[in-house]
Image (cartoon, helix red, strand yellow):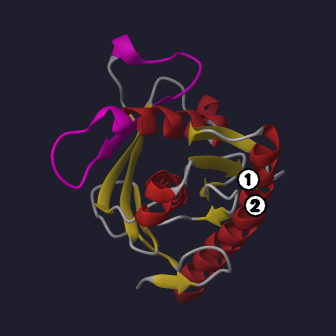
Amino acid sequence: MMEVAEEPGLREIGCEHSLLSRPDGSATFVQGDTSVLAGVYGPAEIKVSREMHDKATIEVMVRPKVGLPAIQDKNHEQLIRETCESVILGTLHPRTSITIVLQVINDGGSILSCFLNAACMAMMDAGLPMNAMFCGVTCALDDDGQLIIDPNTKDQKESRAVLTFAIESSEKKVLTISSRGAYSPAELQQCIAAAQNSAQKIFHFYRDSVKRRYSKS
């Protein structure tokens, strides 16, 4: 059953765990009209040519709603992989592969942050060892300098800058940033503060969602 919550500044968020039988962990994450399905496979065997002797090899695949992955999808894959690598305790599973597959169900804006949230929930569902949780928060700045958290497609099109932050749960540090458009150093700091504030609410939602799930089982 879909868990749903409304948080100030964020569109309505929801998630469902363990939807797929083949992956080791899966989750769907919804933010307003944006939804992503994530599957995690591994730790599993890997070809000798691609294995790393001291840690797991992490792969991320983004599948668009229709057609083949574009350059933007490849950029998203790299950022999500770097984020996952920074929290997964890969040294516990050397010479193995962990694959995260992200399928776009619907893109209604802030798709990268939805990818990050779906990936984290699926990784938790798979029981991967992590030193912290993480989440994605997207901010948009309009021409007047107004800040919109979790913008929809229309907000993004009308904004002069869009920034997505991956934030970890233990110290609320920014792990990775993706941005387009022009913004000042002061606006960057303003966006980081707003993203960290929203991240608290998303982590709270994660914990409630997992708690409810295990209390049912």
Q: Residues within 10 Å of mark 1 (few under 14, many from 20)?
A: many
Tag 2: amino acid: Ala
Seen in the picture, residue 211 relative to 95 is either above or below; the reply is below
Seen in the picture, residue 59 relative to 100 is either above or below; the reply is above
* Side (left or right) of 30 relative to 90: left
Q: Which of the pair 179/88 is nearer the observer?
A: 179
- Which residue does the numbered mark 2 point to in the structure image? 194
Look at the numbered disc 2 and give the secondary structure of its residue.
helix
Tag 1: amino acid: Cys
**Residue at horizontal 57 percent and vertical 25 percent from the top:** 55
Seen in the picture, residue 4 relative to 206 is either above or below; the reply is below
Residue 69 counted in the magenta span: yes
* Side (left or right) of 186 relative to 118: right
Q: Quadrant of residue 9?
A: bottom right
The Cα–Cα distance between marks 1 and 2, rounded to whole angstroms, is: 5 Å
Q: Quadrant of residue 25?
A: bottom left
> Bounds of the magenta span?
48-73
- Which residue does the numbered mark 1 point to in the structure image? 191
The reply to whether dot 1 and dot 2 touch (C-beta < 8 Å) is yes
Look at the numbered disc 1 and give the secondary structure of its residue.
helix
Residue 114 can be seen in this image? no
**Residue at horizontal 82 percent and vertical 44 percent from the top:** 186
Residue 5's x, y, as percent? 58, 84
Residue 120's x, y, as percent? 55, 55
* Image quarter (top left, top right, bottom left or bottom right) of the N terminus: bottom left
